[in-house]
Amino acid sequence: MKKLLLLVCLITSIAHAEDGYRLWLRYDLVDNPRLLAEYRSSITGLQSTASETATKELLQGLQGLLGKKIPLLTTPQEGTLVVRTSPTTLGDEGYIIRTETIAGKHITQITANTDRGVLYGVFYFLRLIQTQQSIQKLAISSSPALPYRILDHWDNLNRTVERGYAGFSIWNWHTLPGYIDQRYIDYARANASIGINGTVLNNVNASPLILTPDYLEKAAAVAQTLRPYGIKVYLSVNFSSPIAIGGLKTADPLDPAVQDWWKKKTDEVYRYIPDFGGFLVKANSEGQPGPQNYGRTHADGANMLADALAPHKGIVIWRAFVYSETHEDRAKQAYNEFKPLDGQFHKNVWVQVKNGPIDFQPREPYHPLFGAMPQTPLMLEFQLTQEYLGFATHLAYLAPLFKECLDAGPPVASTITGMAGVANIGTDRNWCGHPFAQSNWYAFGRLAWNPKLSSAEIADEWLRQTFTNNPGFIDTVKKIMLTSREAIVDYMTPLGLHHIMGYGHHYGPAPWYDKASRADWNPVYFHKADSAGIGFDRTATGSDALSQYPPAIRAQWEDPKNCPDIWLLWFHRVPWGWKMHTGRTLWDELCHRYYTGVDSVRAMQKAWASVKGKVDEERAHQVEMLLNIQEKEAVWWRDACLLYFGTFSHMPLPEKAEQPAHTLDYYKKLQFPNAPGTSR
Ligand code: BDP
């Protein structure tokens, strides 16, 4: 029996090389004979009145996992899986999975109020088997903590992806609406499996063309493909659309002709996509047009769009990522701008706030707007694509970053109505570039459903489904994942340093860069190193950004002696000889962290090498190659940053440590004109 199983496993794995395309929905035969026998006897047939989508997924999943045909039944027998809609108290997305005895027969029931809920239950049930848990006595009920769980694609209509590192946009606008790529369906399955219920198809730096009939027809075809999976389509819109495609002279939100244009345009959008989710807007930020061009506020702009969407029950998601060239600390600007508008937004406006006050850095304190706008529904925006975390080359499991924010302050998770994740998906065969980058897509969905899950739990379930249930593999690789983000913080931006990456493309270190046209686009603006010290004083003696946080948090962070080391240089400017909580001086600690970062990557390489035989060769080799690049880049970061900061500290690198292979001048001269992710 064992031998036969092995053979079947071998054949299945040869049949489809592990190229990562199947994500965490691999549905290969359960390789544990005891459990396989349990599953086979617990599921002898399927009685389903669920949607075709859910039934099909279930059959595909079960037949793969159990290695047998699952008969479709009309009345339950011993071991029948019954799947249907039926009233529950769990809202329109929650589900119940229970083992029950009816007329002496043991059955498993998956029920929910809606098809969508049933589908979520189906995926949960399949996950139990994929992760090899017992399904004999189930009593599960689950519903999402947050109603809005949305992916934001920064995809352009020409298929380039802003900050995308996994190929081109998955949306092939050229062949839409006629051609529905299988990838769209698998994208929908993957999202539904983790509870994602919305997607913004295009870049926040939005082309006005997205609202022309040609593109609406294409977007409608995508919407139709995603609909059976409970996923709504949203679009990013350009605030100047009335001028760009409507022939108007202005886009002033208080101008009746402009209001009328948006109303008619919105009605038209709903004719194409009756369940359209709404508009996402980046306005008056980084050169995008907005209401302030006409002396109006963000509330004026958002409300005008909200009124056009309201009759259709659509929402406006208005981004708070705004900053302009003023003398004000960039970290303070969104709060200054938006906090006074709390209470002025119409009912269907959601304000979307990035996790931190600057911009998706490897580590940022939580954004002070969370908890500060009690009258406005807030969306929390994370970046799944690794713009500032080594692109898709570095192994960075971001659940710890997400959790750090969700659990911080009020806590943040209790102040939000939804989560948006800037997608890391492209046309790469494995979707996200790095085989481990898929875990960030996965973790995002799981946390949006349940922010209480731990990073370790999510890593565990993702690994089991994506690679193997082998305990040795899981233990080792889970550790790699759980240390990976901190490793990056250490070798890129330890102790609260931020935004010291290469200008524009954000690839590699460039803490010396000072040539950008705007002060707050220059790394030197953020670290302020000189011979007296380093760091951004955000206390009352500096920009006072700390005053935007609640008193208890402020009290903890405002005295550099109490401030946790991880935030030190974010909030304080301190001398090089500053005594850290570790007992080291600041300079020594900085060196220690940079060296530790590189060591962590080397430990990750070793750990990965140790599980080689436990994972398919294809992905084993891919990850090995990527870790090699990561190690080189970590060394590059460490050496370039320490050489540069050493010109101010005038202190030496640790004597016995590995010394830089190049001069500072060498690092400064490196150029990357073709770094990915920058074209619009
Ligand atoms: C920054 C990116 C830029 C985005 C911007 C945004 O560098 O490409 O357009 O965020 O969020 O992180 O709008």
Image (spheres, rainbow, N blue to C red):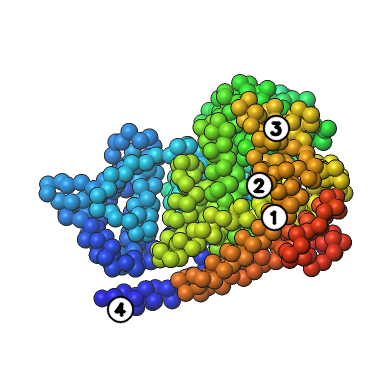
Name the residue carrying label 2: 582
If you read the primary sequence from the N terminus, does the residue marked by circle 2 or circle 4 appear first? 4
Per the model, the C-alpha gap separating discs 4 and 1 is 51 Å
Q: Nearer the viewer, mark 2 or mark 1?
A: 2
The secondary element bearing badge 3 is classed as loop
Number of residue marks:
4
Q: Are marks 4 and 1 in contact (CB under 8 Å)?
A: no
Residue located beneath label 4 in the image:
3
**Few, some or many C-alpha atoms within 10 Å of disc 3 (few <14, some 14-19, many ≥20)?**
some
Measure how far apart labels 2 and 1 are at the Cα level. Answer: 11 Å
Residue 81 % position (x, y): 25, 53
Q: CA distance from mark 1 to mark 3?
A: 23 Å
Give me the residue at 51% from left, 38% from top. Answer: 148
User: What is the distance, in whole Å, between disc 3 and disc 2 at their CAs?
Assistant: 17 Å
The amino acid pointed to by label 1 is His
Please, what is the three-letter code of the amino acid marked with disc 4? Lys
Residue wearing tag 3: 559
Label 4 beta carbon less than 8 Å to ligand 1 = no
